[in-house]
Image (cartoon, rainbow, N blue to C red):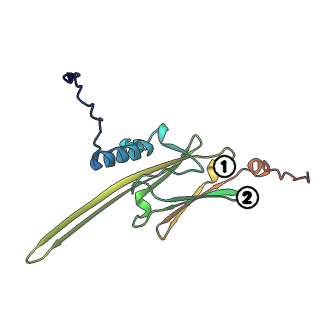
Amino acid sequence: MAEAPSKAPAKPEAKPTTRVVSPLSSLRREIERLFDDFDIGAWRRPAGGMFDVEPFWRGELTFGKAPAVDIAEHDKDYEVAAELPGMEEKDIDVKFADGVLTIKGEKKEEKEEKKKDYYLSERRFGSFQRSFQVPDGVEADKIEASFKNGVLTVVLPKSAEAQKREKKIEIKKG
């Protein structure tokens, strides 16, 4: 006689777990990573202070808030040139204290136009502050600043001692 087939208990097949990743969540993570990598803390500081001081050789990047600055070292002085288009001398303040050079400025612009069929009123304003730690050996009482064609130039003369500090090192053949 033929035996009846026995039925073994069947287990449902385990379905592989898949995680659906939304393109928007991926974009969000990437944007969050970008802001984590970028120092946005400077945007949140309304007033300048001790923690706004930059090394003399490196400028801070803040979108549209801080002017572009070039720093050059010459034999007898350091030169800081800041691009300040559309500003006037009266809107700029340059100070040197405790080895820190600070450049501050504020721009206010108001435009009002009245015509027969329209009225236009615009106001734009903004301020910035950049501070730089200056190397030792600058003669503070001889610092000069000039402003021409939207460029502020600050010259920080080196003391005689600071000018002599540099020593040329001879390279020997090995």
Q: Secondary structure at mark 1?
A: loop
Q: Indicate the quadrant containing the N terminus: top left, top right, bottom left or bottom right.
A: top left
Residue 4: percent from left, percent from top: 18, 22
Name the residue located 44 percent from the left edge and 44 percent from the top edge. Answer: 37
| Dot 1 alpha-carbon crowd within 10 angstroms: few under 14, some 14 to 19, many 20 or more | some
Residue at the spot of label 1: 139
Mark 1 or 2, nearer chain start: 2
Q: Amino acid at mark 1?
A: Glu
Residue at the spot of label 2: 75
Tell me the CA gap for discs 1 and 2.
14 Å
From the viewer's perspective, is the residue at label 1 or at label 2 nearer?
2
Q: Secondary structure at mark 2?
A: loop
Residue closer to the observer: 57 or 149: 57
Q: Amino acid at mark 2?
A: Asp
- The vertical placement of 153 against 23, above or below, is below
Give left or right: position of 160 versus 139: right
Name the residue located 32 percent from the left edge and 49 percent from the top edge. Answer: 27
